[in-house]
Structure formats: structure tokens, C-alpha cells
Amino acid sequence: MSSLAGKVALISGSSAGLGAAIAQELFARGASVVINYPFPSEKANANKLLERLGDSKRAIAVEADLSTRDGPQALVDEAVKVFSKIDILVNSAGINRPIFLDDPNDSTVEKTWHDIVNLNGRGVFFLTRAVLKHLSRENSRIINIGSSASRTPSPQSSIYAGTKSMVEVYTQCWATELPRKYGCTVNAVAPGPVATDAFLAAPSFVREALQPLIDATPVAPRLGRPEEIAWTVATLAEERAGWINGAFIPVNGGSAIF
Ligand code: NAD
């Protein structure tokens, strides 16, 4: 399939997890992809993905920590240096660290707030802002990875779910603000629990708390698969999806129906 041939896709946080699956699906549909990883310790994962893709002309990996002040611009500068433009931005980089509001350790709470908000909230905003200057003015796409958590929050998720609400509302604002000016659509894809390495490595209480929800999922009692989220994102990236704008698309087997 080469329905996205000639397109350039930048996928934040794509050395692992959903971002990596999304990069693979967009690449398989013909797009050139900019893979992003945050730290030197993630470089090996990014390189493994590059090897799997196996076409050095259509894929690069760029180190940029998107929670920092300069990370978003540095990522965009490198992407544009190599590919000259961006057609598809997927804001996938995000972290989750469960914590109670009344956790007694002030410094842990402050660090958790700082880390999650700076990546999931600030990073998405400033990466999108940096991309706009280079976004193709026709049939371009901004696709934000939200989460069911913004609509069905659970204990210990106030910071994470709060940032995913930000992502949801950014999507709605940008879907009204950007399309005529930038030729884009803006949508959010909101997974339920997905079997990424990060999810499977989460503390057991996280999985245990979600187990009843997983067991009761109408389509099947299982976690989502990264490729199911990737398919949805890539389908939104297709030119034929150009009339979908401002949507919040749950991909969760019906575990939460909004
Ligand atoms: P993951 O931890 O498996 O992958 C996250 C990726 O982001 C990795 O490549 C990591 O290197 C990168 N990253 C981490 N910090 C970064 C930073 N500061 N700058 C740039 N990149 C950074 O996570 P995942 O489960 O694949 O989650 C991806 C997105 O999907 C997140 O936004 C997450 O909130 C969302 N999501 C995940 C699930 C799930 O169950 N896995 C459910 C709903 C939503």
C-alpha cells in the first residue's frame, strides 16, 4: 500500500510503544517518517526501528527531549533539514506516573507534576507550534494521542488525566483555529489500555486496578494492540479522511463509550 507516498510524518516519542507502531504503519503506507527519541539511552531502540523499516532514505531518528524548552524546535529543525516539509504530525510522546493528590512526599509530587505536564501538556503545544511553519498547506494532518483517562479518570491519575484533557481540548481548539489557514485537520485518538512495553512494565496495582475494565470490555476481554491504534491514526492521515476534523476517537473495544 502506498497511499501516503510523498508524505512526511513526524511522530513524537516513537522509539517505542504506540509511537513506534504508528511510525511503522505510516511508513508501510508509503510515508517518510521522522522517529523521535528523548535521550541517548533510547537511541538503540530508535536504531532498531530504523533497521526494521530498512529504507534509510525514508526514515530518520532524531534525539530531542520534548519536555525541555528547546526540544520541540530542535526536532522540527532536524526534520525539515532532511525532508523540507511536514505533512503529518502525530503527538504521541507522553508519560504516566500514578500518584495520589495527598502523597506525603512534596518533592515527588512536584517532580511528577513537572515531568508529566512538561511533556504531555507543554510538549504537545510547543511541538505543534513549531511544526506549523513547515506544515504542508494542503491535506495535512495533526493527530493527537489522547486517552480514555480524560473521560474516565481513576484514582492516582489526576495529573496524567488532566494533561490528556488538555490534549483533548487543544484538539478542539485547533480544529476550529487551524484548518483554513494551514490546510489541515486536527483530531484526537484516545486509546484505552494498550499492551505496550511501558504499560506491561507499570506497577502491578495499575494493571490490577484496570483488570475489571479489561475483563468487561465488550469486544473482547483483552488489552488493545499497538497496531490497532496505529491503524486508526494512519487512516486519519489518509487524504480520504479529510472531512474528519475535531473528532475524539476512542479505540478501546468499547471499554468506555462516550
Ligand atoms: P511508551 O512509554 O511505550 O512510549 C513512549 C515513547 O515516548 C517512547 O518512545 C519514549 O522514548 C518517548 N518519550 C518519553 N519521554 C519523552 C520525551 N521527554 N521526549 C520525547 N519522547 C519521549 O508509551 P506508550 O504506552 O506507547 O504511550 C504513547 C502515548 O499513548 C502516550 O501519549 C500515552 O499517554 C498514550 N496512551 C497510552 C496508553 C497505553 O495503555 N499504553 C493508553 C492511552 C494513551
Image (cartoon, grey):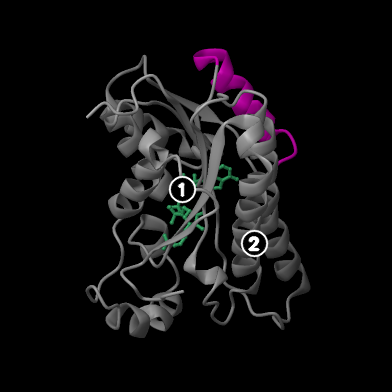
The answer to whether residue 17 of the structure is visible from this angle is: no
Image quadrant assignment for residue 111: bottom right
Task: Estimate the spatial distance between the alpha carbons at disc 2 and disc 1, rounded to whole Å.
Answer: 23 Å
190 relative to 173, above or below:
below
**In front of the other: 156 or 151:** 151
Where residue 241 appears, x then y in whole percent? 40, 42
**Residue 163 marker:** 2
Q: Earlier in the sequence, mark 2 or mark 1?
A: 2
Q: Tag 1, which secondary structure?
A: loop
Q: What amino acid type is highlighted by mark number 2?
A: Thr
Is the shortest distance between ligand 1 and the CB of mark 1 under 8 Å?
Answer: no
Expressed as whole percent of the image width and height from the top left, the position of residue 69 reads: 75, 38
Magenta part of the chain: 67-84
> In the image shown, does 30 or 105 lie closer to the viewer?
30
- Say whether residue 103 is magenta: no
Q: What residue is rendered at 39% in x and 75% in y?
A: 207
Percent x, y of residue 95: 55, 57
**Which mark is drawn over residue 102?**
none
* Distance from mark 2 CB to nearest ligand 1 atom below 8 Å: no
Q: Residues within 10 Å of mark 1 (few under 14, many from 20)?
A: few
Say if 192 sits above or below 91 in the image: below
Where residue 161 sits in the image (x, y, percent)?
59, 69
**Label 2: element kind:** helix
175 left or right of 29 in image: right
Q: How many marks?
A: 2
> Residue at (39%, 46%) from the top-left corner?
233
Using the rendered view, name the quadrant where residue 47 is placed. Answer: top left
Q: Tell me the residue at 55%/22% (across/down).
A: 79
- Is residue 247 shown left or right of residue 25? right
Checking the image for residue 244, the label placed there is: 1
